[in-house]
Amino acid sequence: MNEKPVFDPSSFEPKWQAAWEKARVAYVDTAAPVGPEKFYMLMMFPYPSGDRLHVGHGRNYILGDAVFRYFRMRGRKTLNPMGWDAFGLPAENAAIKSGVPPRAYTTRNIAAMKEQFRAWGILYDWSKELASCDPAYYRWNQWIFLKMWERGLAYRRKAPVNWCPGCRTVLANEQVVDGRCERSGDPVEPRDLEQWFFKITDYAERLLDGLDGLAEWPEKVKTMQRNWIGRSSGAAIRFAVPALDSVLTVFTTRPDTLYGATFLALAPEHPLVASIAARSPWRADLEAFVARVRQESRIDRESEAGTKEGFDTATTAINPATGEPIPIWLANFVLPDYGEVAIMSVPAHDSRDFEFARKFGLPIRPVYLPPDGPLDPAAMTQAWLEGGEVSGSGDWNGAPASRAVELAIATVEERGWGERRTTYRLRDWLISRQRYWGTPIPAIYCDACGLVPEKEENLPVLLPADVEFKGAEGNPLAGSESFLSVPCPRCGGPGRRETDTMDTFVDSSWYFLRFVDPRNDARPFDPAIVARWLPVDQYVGGIEHAILHLLYARFFCRVLRDLGMIGFEEPFARLFNQGMITRLNPATGKVEKMSKSRGNTVSPDELIAQYGADTERVYTLFMGPPEKECEWSPDGVAGAYRFLARVHDACAAIAEMPAAGVVGDTPLVRKAHRTIRRITDDIDRFHFNVVVSGLMEFQRALTDAAAEGAEVKETPAALHFAARVLLKLLHPVAPHLTEEWWERFGEAPFLLDAPWPEADPAMLIEETIEIRIQVQGKLRDKIMVDRELEPAEVERRAQEREGVQRWLGGRKARAYFNAQKQIINFVPVGEGEA
């Protein structure tokens, strides 16, 4: 007998990575006709903000590769592309810190991450690779922007931003820490700057309605998007402000409580605040309040538990229902992007208004009668929220709560106080970024023509190379004369380019369309190719992108459909969100999300060097349900390595046996067919942790059957059959080891192209079944019997069991046998009988 081969992943993993790469096994010709066998598999493309991936990142990409290999083996023509979400702030910060230009920094990181993908054994169709920082890609960002501008979907207006006076630039919210710039430490100032927006609110209803058709999206994600869009129905009511000879419009979902409105609350950002301040006897204090509140975080301002702050403006409005003047207050809990930036406050029937009114001594007027009698405003300790019958409310007085809102809206419209309205929490998408490393916005300022779009034939508007990154120069583009000075596309006179760049979410809002036609120089993509391959059949990525990225991608698809470029509105038919990997943080002693900033990452490079890529893949998929958060364990990694070593040893033992002969009907063969069915079902449900568990169980059965002197003898042909089944089922999880043994067994590469095994229904029928035995409804024993045994014989054998006799205590019993559920219940005669 030959010497037993040693399990050494380093001896064969690089070999198969090179072979897959040379054979381009993942390549798909998307321009060729494709039928129903097409399967577009997509992972959310990574952001190369660092030069190395850690094992937490691997959970996403390893899972995706397993799914890709599975569908390939199922006979699907599977497209699995990869690219890079390559624009963004980290590259610019790195340039300031190290002097490495953003393009060089990003390109270096991409190269390092590609090598890590290769070392994991992950297969992508690299002929489809794209990077959002490539002018060949962002040219089409600019083209889509121009098309949206033409349709009124891209526009410019003033918006509040975080301004750092030290860096002389706008900061993203995540760059503001405790009210200061994370880089310079300067206090951040709120400023209103002209900004570019996409009018996503025009699509709010379509985005909301479309969620109902996404049957294969997680309900959690759909709920998050519904809440973000936030449709509300009610009325817009006008309150006259005599002192300003103006009108305040307020949207409310509860117009039925209009008679109970005792004050109005405005956000400090409301457009009328400047006029109110100009006539206020406390102008300086009012302006100081406005400045302070505008620096509070949105989370603090809208929190139910947050401190309610207010300022009396000394100005009144007229309640149109009562004709009474009511005070106008500024309040920190009213947000600048909600409704009309003002609310109608009804303290008797709103908890937040009640708390505010009690704090500042404002009137409380109930307009609902509880069943046990009227509310006493002076005695109320909380708002009454449960409805009842309307009281003291004009035309809808006496109506029950279920009808009052509709009656109130009808009256409001009839009397000219306002009109019915549906509003959305969703705000238009602010895409301006005062950054260098992003897609330049193709707009030009001309003294003669005003703001004009760049001509399509002049695209792409390229990022200049003659910029410096010092950290205090503001937007680097503003200092590049070669970029700024440009002829006006309309009149030819001197013009100045827009220095804002686009939000990086623009890059990720349509990349899945470009992947199927990535080298097209004439247009963003060929609609015919997109029609063949889209929508994406399976999208995989983190739950952190459940709202913005997915919402923006859905928005873009609707815009592109309206442009006549695609024929669908929903980009992703099926969505799966993998959970994050956590690990003990030695600095805090807590189990936290794995991240470089926390210092608790595990390098896949070191792991692969010690155990091999397949070990990391097996453990990553085995550590828990892939949609759940899981903690990394070194012991688990070692256990995965031992499992693969046992697979290797079992295959080595079987390879010594002759493969010829009839496979036959043996216990191992039946086990193989049952495992085929089980693994197939579990992969279809993304239960990869259960998949690995089932494969471990099958490996043990194979090892036992192959062992010399095993209790149950199997034919060599049956062992070879079972070993090949194991290799096929294990391939999506551990591709290197399985590919190696597939070749050693004399099979032609690649396992990826071998058909997925099919379970023989005849082999799924078990010859013996387990019967659970109850006495008076409680489980007392179990028994294995032949499937074909007569029910009377099953009852006799069950009743003879020692445990059953003990619980019956010599009493006669009647047997109730449910063959389908494989359970029998003994009830003593006289007990439980009708």
Image (cartoon, helix red, strand yellow):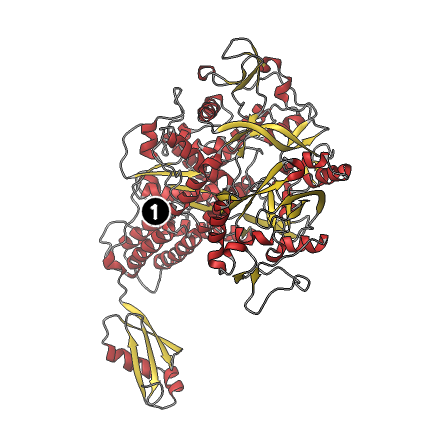
Q: Residues within 10 Å of mark 1 (few under 14, many from 20)?
A: many
> Against 75, is 638 above or below?
below
Q: Looking at the image, how many numbered discs can be counted on the residues?
A: 1
Q: Residue at x 51, y 9 (%)?
A: 491
Q: Nearer the viewer, residue 29 or 166?
A: 166
The residue singled out by tag 1 in the image is 728
Quadrant in which the C terminus appears = bottom left
In screen coordinates, is 83 left or right of 722? right
Q: Which structural element holds mark 1? A: helix
Q: Residue at x 39, y 56 (%)?
A: 694
- Residue 656 spot, x, y in % from top left: 33, 49
> Against 639, is 39 above or below?
above
Amino acid bearing label 1? Lys
Occupied quadrant, residue 157: top right
Q: Nearer the viewer, residue 587 or 116?
A: 587
Let me know if residue 739 appears in the view: no
Q: Nearer the viewer, residue 127 or 664?
A: 127
Occupied quadrant, residue 98: top right
Q: Residue at x 66, y 36 (%)?
A: 244
